[in-house]
Image (tube, coloured by chain):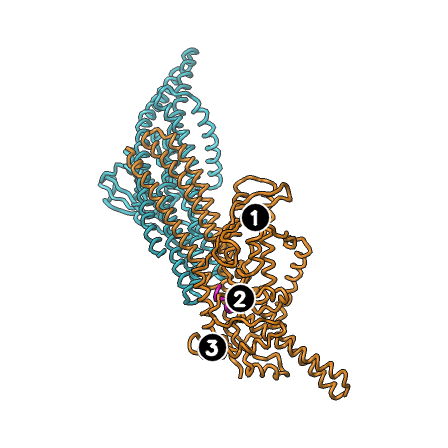
Amino acid sequence: MAAERDPPPPGDAGQARFGEAEDGEDLFVVLCSPASLPAEDISANSNGPKLVDSFLDDDPDDLFAEATEEVSLDSPEREPILSDGPSPAITPIMAPRIDSTLFDQALEEEEDNGDTFDICISVSDPEKVGDGMNAYMAYKVTTKTSLSVFSQNELSVRRRFSDFLGLHSKLASKYMHSGYIVPPAPEKSIVGMTKVKVGKEDSSSTEFVEKRRSALERYLMRTVKHPVMLKDPNVLQFLESSELPRAVSTQALSGAGILRMVNKAADAVNKMTIKMNESDAWFEEKQQQFENLDAQFRKLHASVESLVCHRKELSLNTASFAKSAAMLGNSEDHTALSRALSQLAEMEEKMEQLHMDQAYADFYLFAELLGDYVRLLTAVKGVFDQRMKTWSKWQDAQLMLQRKREAEAKLQYANKPDKLQQAKDEIKEWEGKVQQGERDFEQISKTIRKELGRFEKERVKDFKSVIIKYLESLVQTQQQLIKYWEAFLPEAKAIA
Amino acid sequence: FSLLSLAVNVDLQTDGTLQVDISDALSERDKVKFTVHTKSTLPSFKQNEFSVVRQHEEFIWLHDSFVENEEYAGYIIPPAPPRPDFDASREKLQKLGEGEGSMTKEEFTKMKQELEAEYLAIFKKTVAMHEVFLCRVAAHPVLRKDLNFHVFLEYNQDLSVRGKNKKEKLEDFFKNVVKSADGVLVAGVKDVDDFFEHEKTFLLEYHNRVKDASAKSDRMIRSHKSAADDINRIASTLYTLGTQDSTDVCKFFLKVSELFEKTRKIEARVAADEDLKLADLLKYYLRESQAAKDLLYRRGRALVDYENANKALDKARAKNKDVLQAETTQQICCQKFEKISESAKQELIDFKTRRVAAFRKNLVELAELELKHAKVTSPHLLLVKN
């Protein structure tokens, strides 16, 4: 009986399944023995998934972080997979129905926790350290929190950009293949940094530093908002410890950097060759949705950047017009008109500042957020790719198993007892691997579902708050405009 | 149309005896056909009310005939209307048509509407410019009696005014070069009359500054329009995002899309108003100040001629040769100069009055419109915010 992968309806069906969860958990513990996972609290009312640090260090690949919510894996459903030897290619994805209610509940829990989610990170005080090409900017990272995982309520450390990148790369290598959406770090910018290093003290380099500071702050906030990341020791270390080992592997031309590039290329090739048999309509739909979203967001980002550019242009042109109007006012020999023109010029100067401010608002509020989301969407796509990779691994394991079985069958006829034993052992080994592969796949699928749900919620929150701030800035601009024009009107009327 | 024309057409003594306006206009591929409508109680016209169809070249012909007429040397000739220029707009429409495949239907319709509105605005403006020219002529006590003007208004056939051919255009070009060189020479001659000396310096400086202000205001308005276009694109992308499905997220995006749409309309309107009240005003007075400068040049020329004639007369008397001829020449020059001076003074005073009134009107209207827009936007924004 193949469970069809529909998005499970919230409500009744979910409730019925909950009971089975208890049983499933026991089975799960048994099956998890190789990783010696301590029995976790199964209640869905847990305060986010509990990560066991030591466990992670032993076996980074086997990340059963969601032990608390592991629902399925009841044996009756698993049998068909194992006996479905001959045609693994059309094996339906047997991951049993995951209760969306559990997800929702977990999410709600997180939401509630989010309301009492008391951590605020700010990045400030950019300071140039050193000179010449070895110089770098150090930022002060201040954490204010009442969460218990932290040693103090208020912490402050100094970090440089490569530290942030180092943190991200550690988190990515840990969590990405399990399907977590790891918030992407701000991008490197050789041009920007060189200007700063060289010591060019102009508005563009100040702008660059400010842009970066703001991006780093958003990055950290987004990282700690993720319940899994928040508990990660790397994150805690980053926020707390005064000294951090220099993350050399983030440099583009380092050995690690080149390795990364090679891996990326390999991944890209793999992506093209893996043809995943998607029998879960939910995932298919979501993937399509995210492709669309990605395209739209990129377009939006481009338009907003263009708007910022034009507003800046408008500001400059207004300034030059103001000067020109002032000159005209000087030439005008009719006194009242001359005065009015000078007033116009002054007013236009003020408008110039207004336009500039509006441009900055457009930019910092809107454009940067969109940029972040374009990068986040890439991370989301990455997560889908990971799922594909996991599926592929599972399929490969199944193939191997089949081959081993065939080899065993052959040996049975050839009657070679010692080789037979070896073959039987290999079969056992590969059976285990198949089971593991399937578990991994189910795990990652579940994680992704949860992550996507979280992503959607965060997205709405982010955008709502930004749009509201943006609206407020627009309102303010309009009110200023009113003030200026009201001041000008009597002058214009006074021209006799 | 009349509303637009009043923008620059201020303080004209429009009495009932002669009223001219452009009642209709038709835009064909390459040209615009204006329907010039006249209402008059003057006996020189056969009817009291009549209309003819004229094209831009015929306006230019009329203007040039004024300029070339020696009798009118002492008047500020109303500047000729600029040629209708739809090239930019047409190009944009074409580009839009070519790029139709690459955008969604909503985007395409929206951009098309935008461009069509722009086309219409340019069209209205060119009609207004042509109308202003005719009204100025009709309001001028001397020019309104011009025969060519009456023919222009009344003759209901094609005036067969062909545009200048290449040779003539080249002749014009050289004439202008000579004229501006001469203008420099003439301007160098100091005028005994304080009034004119002052006007000379004033107009020179004023003209240059108006030119600068006009260019800068154009650039400013263009940026404004580009920003409005960007907002338009943002609004449509948000709309697409919002229509992907009907979840809360998408409803939210739809709302935001509406907001941007409204913002864009306001910004576009602000830019358009600035364009009308400020940029067009400056452009018009750029041309008028040039016409005033031309008047001063003619007077200066006449003065130089007069002084030269005086010198020639003295020489002739000294040599006692061709005295009579020299005397007649001198008389003619003197009369010409004095005639020009007399009317020029009044013209320049009128120019100032008109200018001040036009600026006042436009600046006041600009301020009022901007206030109106800003006051409308604020509540809109607050509404959407909540």
Q: Are marks 2 and 1 on the same chain?
A: yes
As drawn, B179 above or below A42? above
Label located before the other in sequence (1 or 3): 3
Distance, label 1 to label 3, CA atoms, is 47 Å
Q: Nearer the viewer, mark 2 or mark 1?
A: 2
User: Looking at numbered disc 3 in the image, what kind of residue is underneath it?
Assistant: Phe
Calculate the distance from the C-alpha at mark 2 to the C-alpha at mark 1. 29 Å
Check whether the beta carbons of the residues at disc 3 and disc 2 lie within 8 A of each other: no
Mark 3 neighbour density, 10 Å: few (under 14) some (14–19) many (20 or more)? some
Dot 3: what SS? helix
Q: Identify the residue position indicated by label 3 in the image.
A: A18
Magenta-colored span? A447-454
Q: Are marks 1 and 3 on the same chain?
A: yes
Q: Which residue in the structure is indicated by mark 2?
A: A50
B28 relative to A418, above or below: above
Q: Quadrant of residue A329?
A: top left
* Residue A317 place in picture, x, y as percent: 45, 41
Q: Secondary structure at mark 2?
A: loop
Question: Is residue A185 one of those drawn in magenta?
Answer: no
Residue A158 got which mark?
1
Give x and y (percent) for residue B315.
43, 13
Where, by quadrant of the figure, is residue A391 drawn?
Answer: bottom right
Residue at image point 47% right, 30% down: B178
Tag 2–tag 1 contact (CB < 8 Å): no
Q: Tag 1's secondary structure?
A: strand
- Colour orange, chain: A
**In the rendered view, would you say A325 is above or below A154?**
above
The residue nearer to you, when weighing B113 against A31, is A31
Kindly check if marks 1 and 3 are in contact, taking CB atoms under 8 A apart as contact. no
